[in-house]
Image (tube, coloured by chain):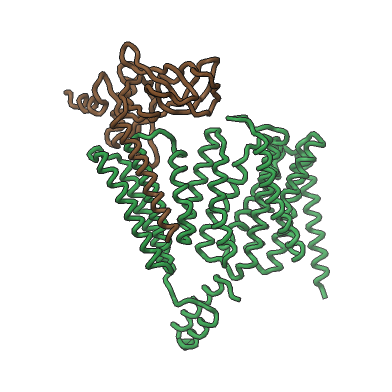
Chain colours: A brown, B green
């Protein structure tokens, strides 16, 4: 029974810790806007989603420590003049402060580091997935962006927006037009 | 000592004899007690419990995947824990109050595995957690691994193995290292070994049909082997070792039906299929070929791992070969010797720089195996075995007859020569039978 008890505790702890960490990011994280590029699909157990690719996937290596592909790294973020987030640097050492998320290095070319973006999907209600996907395909890379909360190295997507309107609302408005 | 399969047969027979009035119930009861046959039970109950839980669990997962927009994050979290706690409550009750019940153990264990998967999926969906199916499977497999041990549950073990197989297949498709799959498979190995050592039953046979292909595929795919001939030789060794392992288990499962020996059946069938394929000259093109390199190049760990797997299965095949030769069952010994034939073929293709010796060896081996199975089937009075041998022979003959890679002259002469040999053998046997 002790092993069963431990197993039950582990089974509860895994979703509980994920929920706790996610809720902290959403409550305390700084909200940034990222430009995105379009794509598609469905997950076997989690349902339909919009797959996301981001323009901000590389930045300069900063700090004395070297980086290797596959290594964990911290990605420093800043906002440009239009209010969109961009990568100001990638470092192996955890930053003392500032806005950053943790991820892995994909490739390195001279001093430019390409990273694996820690957000790659937004799950959608099954009935609206197709309409959102179409709207997003048309908007991504132009007037569509993702709003992502970043807190102590963790990043969680909060919403996708088209022209500043949440994507689900945008689709509902478009379908209501005569 | 009667095997599980013999006792099961006896139980059915005793029930029939009592029902027909041929045997008094008290005598049947004494016989039951003597052979340790349990009271008549409904074998369909555990099966229905497993099916019911599996369908309900999968249905719940599908309903959650709809991603109901009316559900708030708090409701989803509540749903996630309610689902998990309900399954845990059911499992705890089954463990405490219903321990001897196969249906309860199997059903509760399956519910626990499915509920933990559904909970992880629901959290991932709610917070749009990044990552593919593999990242989901990693958490789920880690939580599911202890369940078969706790409940002695075969259905949960089978589901776990299928998850590990899916993880491995996804890694191979992405060109990523698959060594974590080795740990997932190793975590299930003690359970499978324990079950294999214990007396086999129908539930173990069911698990075997899932475990044998998953483990054989895992043994081949975990380590990166880029030389195709090395991979084919390793595959041949894994198949022969699997067959030999099953053939050893067969000795313990006296009175068992054909589905009770998955390793033997699957290993034998795969060897026959591979022999048929290797009979084609063009197939031997793999000798000296390299697999397209994807992801990181193979390292010393891959070589060491593949060598260990190869040696382990070679030992199993060697033991099987020795045992079958000692029993005088040379056709079965031939099956265990399959890697020797493939290895000799590869060496011959390398040495003569032509693919024909490889194909010739495979055809000769297939011919010997087919004839051997027919003779063994006739000797042991097992028509199915004799038919399997005939099927292999027929397939080989037809394939070679239509094989345009070989010249008409060569094919014609070989067919006539073999036909004459068979006719002479027939004549000799017929003369020997005359008084």
Residue closest to the far top: A81
Give the residue drawn at x 34%, y 41%: B123
Quadrant containing the C terminus of chain B is: bottom right
Residue found at the very far front of the displayed protein:
A96
Residue B291 higher or lower than B64, as above or below: above
- Residue B369 location, x and y as percent? 72, 55
Image side of residue B433 versus residue B41, left or right:
right
In the shown orientation, is residue A149 left or right of residue B211? left
Looking at the image, which residue is at 66% across and 49% down?
B238
The answer to whether any part of residue B397 appears in the image is no
Residue at left offset 79%, top offset 58%:
B423
Image coordinates of residue B156 in percent, x first then y, are 45, 55
Residue found at x 64% / y 49%: B273
The percent position of residue B254, horizontal first and vertical second, equals 61, 70
The percent coordinates of residue A31 (x first, y second) are 30, 24
Question: Residue farthest to the left?
Answer: A178
Q: How many marks?
A: 0
- Which is nearer the eye, B97 or A131? B97
């Amino acid at each position: 029974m002790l092993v069963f008890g431990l197993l039950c505790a582990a089974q509860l702890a895994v979703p509980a810790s994920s929920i706790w960490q996610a809720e902290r990011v959403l409550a305390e994280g700084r909200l940034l806007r990222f430009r995105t590029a379009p794509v598609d699909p469905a997950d076997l157990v989690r349902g339909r989603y919009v797959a996301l690719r981001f323009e901000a996937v590389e930045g300069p290596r900063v700090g004395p420590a070297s980086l290797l592909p596959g290594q964990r790294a911290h990605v420093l973020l800043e906002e440009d003049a239009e209010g969109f987030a961009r990568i100001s640097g990638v470092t192996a050492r955890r930053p003392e402060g500032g806005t950053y998320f943790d991820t892995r290095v994909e490739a390195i070319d001279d001093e430019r580091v390409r990273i694996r973006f820690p957000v790659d999907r937004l799950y959608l209600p099954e009935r609206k997935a197709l309409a959102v996907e179409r709207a997003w395909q048309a908007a991504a890379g132009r007037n569509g962006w993702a709003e992502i909360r970043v807190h102590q190295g963790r990043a969680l997507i909060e919403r996708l927006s088209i022209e500043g309107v949440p994507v689900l609302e945008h689709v509902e408005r478009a379908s209501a037009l005569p | 000592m009667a095997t599980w399969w013999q006792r099961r047969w006896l139980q059915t027979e005793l029930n029939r004899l009592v029902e027909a009035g041929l045997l008094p119930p008290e005598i049947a009861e004494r016989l039951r007690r003597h052979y340790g046959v349990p009271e008549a039970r409904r074998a369909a109950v555990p099966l229905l419990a497993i099916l019911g839980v599996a369908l309900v669990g999968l249905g719940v997962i599908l309903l959650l995947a709809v991603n109901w927009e009316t559900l708030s994050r708090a409701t989803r979290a509540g749903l996630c824990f309610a689902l998990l706690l309900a399954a845990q409550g059911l499992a705890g009750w089954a463990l405490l109050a219903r321990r001897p019940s196969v249906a309860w153990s199997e059903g509760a264990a399956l519910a626990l595995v499915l509920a933990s998967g559904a909970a992880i999926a629901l959290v991932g969906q709610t917070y749009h957690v990044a990552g593919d199916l593999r990242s989901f499977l990693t958490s789920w497999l880690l939580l599911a691994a202890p369940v078969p041990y706790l409940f002695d549950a075969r259905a949960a073990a089978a589901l776990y193995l299928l998850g590990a197989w899916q993880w491995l297949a996804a890694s191979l498709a992405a060109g990523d290292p698959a060594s974590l799959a080795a740990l997932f498979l190793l975590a299930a190995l003690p359970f499978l070994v324990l079950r294999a050592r214990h007396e086999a039953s129908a539930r173990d046979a069911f698990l075997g049909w899932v475990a044998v292909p998953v483990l054989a595929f895992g043994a081949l795919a975990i380590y990166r082997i880029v030389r195709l001939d090395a991979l084919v030789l390793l595959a041949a060794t894994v198949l022969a070792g699997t067959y030999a392992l099953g053939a050893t288990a067969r000795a313990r499962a006296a009175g068992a039906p054909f589905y009770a020996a998955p390793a033997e059946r699957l290993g034998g069938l795969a060897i026959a299929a591979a022999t048929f394929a290797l009979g084609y000259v063009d197939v031997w093109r793999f000798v000296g070929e390299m697999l397209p390199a994807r992801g990181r190049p193979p390292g010393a760990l891959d070589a060491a791992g593949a060598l260990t797997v190869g040696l382990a299965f070679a030992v199993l095949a060697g033991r099987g070969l020795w045992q079958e030769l000692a029993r005088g069952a040379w056709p079965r010994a031939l099956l265990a010797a399959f890697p020797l034939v493939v290895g000799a073929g590869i060496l011959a293709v390398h040495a003569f720089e032509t693919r024909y010796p490889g194909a010739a060896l495979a055809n000769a081996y297939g011919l010997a195996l087919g004839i051997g199975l027919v003779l063994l089937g006739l000797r042991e009075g097992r028509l199915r075995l004799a038919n399997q041998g005939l099927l292999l022979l027929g397939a080989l003959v037809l394939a070679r007859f239509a094989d345009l890679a070989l010249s008409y002259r060569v094919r014609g002469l070989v067919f006539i020569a073999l036909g004459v040999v068979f006719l002479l053998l027939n004549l000799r046997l017929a003369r020997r039978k005359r008084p």
